[in-house]
Amino acid sequence: MRSDAGLARSLPPDLAALATDPRLSLHDGRFHELNVDTRDKRITMVIDCGDLQVGYRRLTLSFEGASIRPDDLQRVAAAVGAEFRPNHWHRARAVTEVLEHKVDVLPDGRFVLRLRLWPFYRFAVEFSGFSLGEVPMADPRPARAGPSRHGLLSSVGHEA
């Protein structure tokens, strides 16, 4: 997570909060839902995140004028929806988590959210508009990623 005060001043309020507020850290966050509408260039991510110190919350990140980079929705779907059986590294079943997120301004004035996932994959969302919704959760994150129309990722307007 980037905490550059100069960057935060150049961002819209919701995006500055995502970039700098520790309560909104996506670290260890688990994808509940990811919707991509390529026709209208809208992306919605619902991520369950938090910890014992700041509490747990479900964040809804809504992007306008948005696209995913690299433009490979099948790989993004596989990465955000992956589940792993117990093995010698993990005693319990594990799911993909956000390892790191960074917010930045692109040279054309648009914004980018870069996500590095555990245990594999990186992708970015480039966008012109952003809004953030936050709902406190009484219990820690659910063990499994939530459903959507096509598993975890739903896509509208994408031609296969």
Image: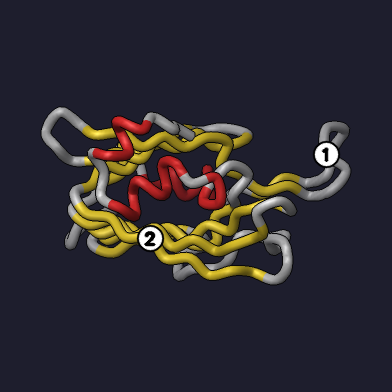
Relative vertical location of residue 113 with respect to residue 128 in this rendering, above or below: above
Q: In the picture, residue 106 is in which quadrant?
A: top left
| Count of residue discs | 2
| Residue at image coords 52%, 57% | 47
Residue 85 x/y as whole percent: 78, 46
Relative vertical location of residue 82 with respect to residue 147 in this rendering, above or below: above
Residue 52 x/y as whole percent: 74, 53
Q: Tell me if mark 2 has few (under 14), some (14-19) or many (20+) residues whose alpha carbon lies within 10 angstroms of its own.
A: some
The numbered dot on residue 120 is: none
Q: Nearer the viewer, mark 1 or mark 2?
A: 2
Residue 83 x/y as whole percent: 67, 49
Position of 143 with respect to 1 (left or right) is right
Secondary element at image label 2: strand
Foreground pick, 88 / 2: 2
Amino acid type indicated by mark 1: His
Amino acid type indicated by mark 2: Leu
Position of 1 with respect to 86 (left or right) is left
Foreground pick, 49 / 40: 49
| Residue at image coords 30%, 53% | 13
Residue 142 x/y as whole percent: 69, 63
Relative vertical location of residue 154 with respect to residue 110 in this rendering, above or below: below
Judging by the rendered image, the residue that carries numbered circle 1 is 90
Q: Tell me if mark 1 has few (under 14), some (14-19) or many (20+) residues whose alpha carbon lies within 10 angstroms of its own.
A: few
Q: In the picture, residue 107 is in which quadrant?
A: top left
Judging by the rendered image, the residue that carries numbered circle 2 is 132
Secondary element at image label 1: loop
